[in-house]
Amino acid sequence: MRIDVVTIFPEYLTPLRQSLLGKAIERGQIDARVHDLREWTDDVHRTVDDTPYGGGPGMVMLPEPWGRALDDLAPAGSPQPRLLIPSPAGRPFTQASARELATEPWLLFACGRYEGIDARVAEYAARRMRVDEVSIGDYVLAGGEAAVLVIVEAVGRLLPGVLGNADSAADDSFSDGRLEAPAYTKPASWRGLSVPPVLLSGNHGEIARWRAEQSQLRTEQRRPDLLS
């Protein structure tokens, strides 16, 4: 999978090179490229924003640098990426979204700042590529970079061969619409707290039933909305 990220803070995306994602990039499973939007400005101050039409607080990111970036990274007539714009006004990003995006060969992220990107950029891009505004939660961040890190990690770990054990993703929370059961490791007794005996029994059928029950219970207690 190819991943391009356009931002005015390229250093913010350094964590992409860490942990599982970093190893996947080193192995060539992910081709990650980070671009500075200011490379597509044309004034001495490398301006990327201006005051909003209609008044109001804050600044809006100019359309022209974004248009140039899109034209350079994905010229018309060539294969096109799927453009993702993190935004609190976007559709919710879920595990199902991650699974869908993991089937794409190329994702391009546009990291907005301030009051966001001029809305015409998404309209322009939609003439030749699929465009999605995506929200990682009902809160507002200073920019899209943190959301990109979240989305890329959620998607990247679902790519074939990225996780050491493919079953790990299959057992994740939300994989079957419920939260994952609690997990334990050695020692069996720690500071007066013991591992549930069923996990030490070696009875795989009983263990599977216990995990299913705990998954259901956790979901009922913490995320009943998932069950509805």
Image: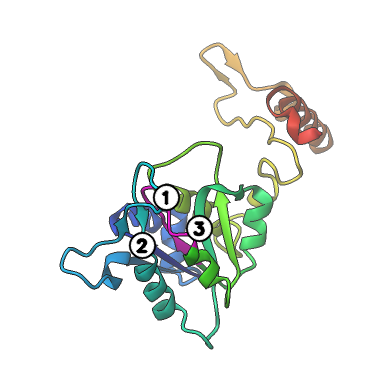
**Can you tell which of label 1 and label 3 is closer to the viewer?**
1
Nearest the camera: 116 or 145? 116
Name the residue beneath numbered marker 1. 54
Q: Determine the secondary structure under disc 1.
A: loop
Quadrant placement of the C terminus: top right
Q: Which comes before the other along the chain, label 2 or label 3?
A: 2
In the rendering, at what x and y percent does residue 183 appear?
62, 32
Residue 201 shows in this picture: no
Q: Is residue 83 left or right of residue 181?
A: left
Q: Determine the secondary structure under disc 2.
A: loop
In the rendering, at what x and y percent does residue 227 appear?
80, 34
Q: Determine the secondary structure under disc 3.
A: strand
Nearest the camera: 220 or 215? 220
Residue furthest to the top in view is 192
**Can you tell which of label 1 and label 2 is closer to the viewer?**
1
Hey, what amino acid is under mark 2?
A: Leu
Residue 151 shows in this picture: yes
Residue 11's disc is none
Name the residue beneath numbered marker 2. 62
In the rendering, at what x and y percent does residue 145 appear?
40, 52
Residue 38 appears in which quarter of the rendering? bottom left
For label 3, the crowd category at 10 Å Cα-Cα, with few meaning under 14, some 14 to 19 and many 20 or more, is many
Magenta span covers which residues? 108-119
Measure the C-alpha gap from mark 1 to mark 2: 15 Å
